[in-house]
Image (cartoon, helix red, strand yellow):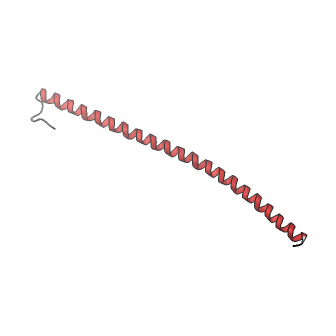
């Protein structure tokens, strides 16, 4: 291989090295963005689970209030038959 060919090969290898460095930087940024998105998704899942629990708690309270109301109606003889 002559000096001119060697210089051309080295020039191409340097260009490849620069491109590879750029690719690594972009990949690093994408990885950081993905990690932030994953953390945000986990937060949303946690919030959703909390909302479902709160909804369940509210429904249980409504059911207890309904039972109390039915009991009051029966005691005041405002209903014909007990409801279950």
Q: Relative to the observer, which residue lies in front, 60 or 14?
A: 14
Q: Residue at 45% x, 41% y: name it.
A: 46
Q: Quadrant of residue 15?
A: bottom right
Question: In x, y percent, where is residue 60?
Answer: 29, 35
Q: Quadrant of the N terminus?
A: bottom right
Question: In the figure, is residue 64 to the left or right of 56?
Answer: left
Point out residue 51 in the picture as x, y percentages from the top left corner.
40, 39
Residue 33: image location, x then y, percent: 60, 48
- For the image, the number of numbered tags is 0
Q: Is residue 35 left or right of residue 47?
A: right
Rendering coords of residue 40 (x, y %): 53, 44
Q: Residue at x 65, y 50 (%)?
A: 29
User: Which corner quadrant holds the C terminus?
Assistant: top left
Query: Outermost residue toward the right?
Result: 3
Rendered position, 65 above or below 37: above
Q: Horizontally, is 19 left or right of 58 in the view?
A: right
The residue nearer to you, when weighing 45 against 7, is: 7
Q: Residue at x 80, y 65 (%)?
A: 12
Decide: is 42 above or below 16.
above
Quick one: which residue is furthest to the front in this view? 1
- Which of the 4 quarters of the picture holds residue 53? top left
* Residue sticking out furthest to the bottom: 1
The structure residue drawn at horizontal position 41% and vertical position 38%, both measured from the top left corner, is: 50
* Camera-side residue of 38 and 73: 38
């Amino acid at each position: 291989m002559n000096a001119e060919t060697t210089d051309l090969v080295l020039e191409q290898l340097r260009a490849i090295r620069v491109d590879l460095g750029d690719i690594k930087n972009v990949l690093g940024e994408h990885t950081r963005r993905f990690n932030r998105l994953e953390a945000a998704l986990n937060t949303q899942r946690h919030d959703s689970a909390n909302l479902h629990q709160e909804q369940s708690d509210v429904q249980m309270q409504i059911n207890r209030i309904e039972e109390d109301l039915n009991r009051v109606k029966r005691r005041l003889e405002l209903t014909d038959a007990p409801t279950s």
